[in-house]
Image: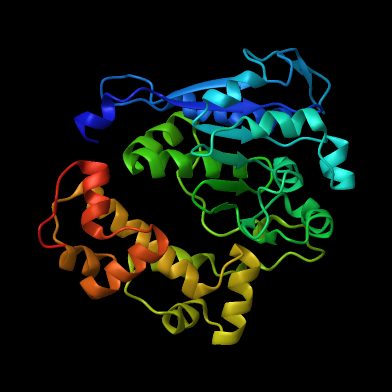
């Protein structure tokens, strides 16, 4: 990370608690963002909880949370996070209480809006998700789709990132989203440090489809897990090779793969290649051609195309952002 980045003021994160709040969701951002620091040990985020009036907020689990701030904190936030809630208007009627609408109206246009789990219902009721990709807990996805048909709902993914608006699936998927934000803001090294401290994986493969309750679980000898593990060591492999590795027809492999991960084999494989390329750009001095080869993308042109598609920048820009070092050959 560059010295300029380390001297910036901490990024202000406000977690807006709406009663009855999902307590687990509420504490995720405080824990993860609160652990992120630069190489000198300075906090990278200033995280606070807020309720509409600054008073305690009841949770759905029988206890209350007393926040530090009231809704006026939203006007100072760089990121506003709405954790899961059972607030009846957004959850059941497709409406938003006026005091919540007023609070969200105070958020600066430049700020990011983030939801965890059923917090997506609040953003949807405020119109913030119209025409945008979003997700929520798989158990409540059908309700979200029915109440807010203008939302581009993807019930299979762990989180969505549409730039200034991000949503996560249920409960622990909020951890995945917060780590993604830290990685996006400050790179993989800091996000991985936070993940290690919290004893969670820095990245979970696949989507929430793998967690949906099913009547008959897949047999272990019919799983694609072995092929996936092998692919991580052989990123140059293609999908037919993985199917042969799993001992399945291509069609069966693709179906089973999606059931287990929520992704197609091709999309998953590209995701792994991009992730490894990001790591190499951050952690090594390798040129773009070498990064492309080691990440299984073959050519520098393929690397540039996939990185722009997934991250929105060129390899050179990515490396400058997270290392502060230009790469002339990119």
The percent coordinates of residue 192 (x first, y second) are 39, 39
Q: Nearer the viewer, residue 143 or 262?
A: 143
Q: Residue furthest left?
A: 328
Q: Give the quadrant of residue 305.
A: bottom left
Question: Is 50 drawn above or below residue 180 in the view shown?
Answer: above
Q: Is residue 327 left or right of residue 179?
A: left
Question: Is 184 drawn above or below residue 131 in the view shown?
Answer: above
The percent coordinates of residue 97 (x first, y second) are 83, 33
Residue at 38 percent across and 26 percent down: it is: 44
Q: Nearer the viewer, residue 91 or 303?
A: 91
Q: Quadrant of the N terminus?
A: top left
The reply to whether residue 155 is in sight is: no
Q: Give the quadrant of residue 287.
A: bottom left
Q: Quadrant of the C terminus?
A: bottom left
The percent coordinates of residue 206 (x first, y second) are 55, 60
Q: Give the quadrant of residue 172.
A: top right
Residue at 69 percent across and 43 percent down: it is: 123
Residue at 32 percent across and 39 percent down: it is: 189
Q: Nearer the viewer, residue 264 or 240?
A: 264
Question: Is 140 drawn above or below residue 45 in the view shown?
Answer: below
The reply to whether residue 3 is in sight is: yes
Q: Nearer the viewer, residue 312 or 117?
A: 312
Question: Is 305 drawn above or below residue 252 in the view shown?
Answer: above
Q: Is residue 91 left or right of residue 312?
A: right
The percent coordinates of residue 208 (x first, y second) are 65, 56
């Amino acid at each position: 990370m560059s010295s300029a980045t380390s001297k910036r003021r901490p990024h202000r994160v406000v977690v807006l608690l709406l009663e009855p709040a999902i307590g687990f969701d509420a504490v995720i951002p405080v824990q993860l963002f609160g652990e992120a620091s630069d190489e000198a040990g300075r906090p990278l985020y200033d995280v606070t909880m807020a309720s509409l009036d600054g008073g305690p907020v009841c949770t759905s689990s029988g206890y209350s949370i007393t926040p530090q701030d009231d809704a006026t904190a939203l006007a100072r936030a760089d990121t506003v996070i709405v954790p899961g809630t059972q607030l009846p208007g957004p959850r059941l009627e497709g409406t938003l209480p006026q005091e919540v609408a007023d609070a969200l109206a105070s958020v600066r246009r430049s700020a990011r809006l983030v939801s965890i789990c059923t917090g997506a219902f609040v953003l949807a009721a405020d119109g913030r998700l119209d025409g945008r990709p979003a997700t929520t807990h798989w158990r409540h996805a059908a309700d979200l789709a029915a109440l807010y048909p203008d939302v581009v709902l993807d019930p299979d993914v762990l989180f969505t990132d549409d730039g200034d608006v991000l949503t996560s699936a249920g409960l622990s998927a909020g951890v995945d989203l917060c780590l993604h934000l830290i990685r996006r803001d400050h790179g993989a090294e800091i996000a991985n440090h936070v993940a290690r401290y919290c004893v969670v994986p820095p990245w979970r493969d696949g989507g929430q489809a793998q967690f949906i309750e099913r009547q008959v679980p897949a047999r272990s000898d019919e799983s694609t897990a072995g092929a996936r593990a092998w692919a991580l060591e052989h990123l140059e492999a293609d999908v037919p090779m993985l199917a042969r590795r799993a001992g399945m027809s291509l069609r069966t492999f693709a179906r089973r793969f999606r059931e287990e991960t929520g992704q197609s084999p091709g999309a998953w494989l590209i995701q792994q290649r991009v992730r490894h390329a990001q790591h190499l750009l951050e952690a090594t001095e390798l040129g773009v051609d070498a990064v492309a080869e080691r990440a299984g993308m073959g050519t520098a042109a393929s690397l540039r195309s996939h990185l722009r598609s997934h991250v929105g920048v060129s390899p050179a820009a990515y490396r400058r952002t997270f290392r502060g070092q230009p790469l002339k050959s990119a």
